Amino acid sequence: MTKNFVLFSGGLDSLCTAIKLIEEHGPEAVELIYVDLATDYSVAERRACARLAKVLKAPLSIIELPLPALFTDPKDNPTSYVPYRNMYLAMVAGTIAYLDKDTTAEFMDDPAHEIV
């Protein structure tokens, strides 16, 4: 079975994406992934993601990646701005998909992806 990963924030875009994939493939074929960047809005997003995952009956994985700590002075208040945020999120999602047992098995069985 193919697994579909959704970078899930609990917002409208990721919710609509999750609903479409669940309608097409079923909740067992969809995994919601929330990447907690430890920003001002993380608590609200985590709460929304957990509630929506229950409604959607889809598993939710939470990955903690406190990037603002790399870009701000610890004496400052937490920030909502994370430079290159979407790049980090895409790398996290790609890594999860690559390392997923089923996805990796299919990937490795394809001769076009042979590791030399």
Image (spheres, grey):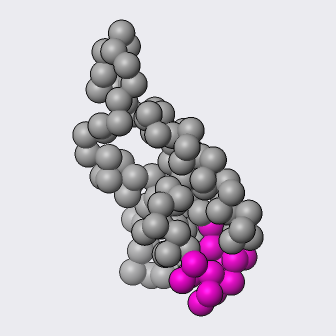
Q: Position of residue 43 (x, y in %)?
A: 56, 38
Q: Quadrant of residue 99?
A: bottom right
Q: Using the rendered image of the protein, determine whether residue 37 is visible from the camera's viewpoint.
A: yes
Relative to 63, 82 lies left or right: left
Quadrant containing the N terminus is bottom right
Across and down, in percent, residue 55 comes to 72, 68
Could you tell me if residue 1 is visible in this image? no
* Picture residue at 49% right of the left edge, 75% below the top: 17
Position of residue 45 in the picture relative to residue 87 (left or right): right
Residue at far left of view: 83
**Residue 26 in magenta stretch:** yes
The segment highlighted magenta reads 19-31
Q: Residue at x 43, y 35 (%)?
A: 39
| Residue 25 belongs to the span the image colors magenta | yes
Which quadrant is home to the C terminus?
Answer: bottom left
Specify the farthest residue to the top.
Answer: 75
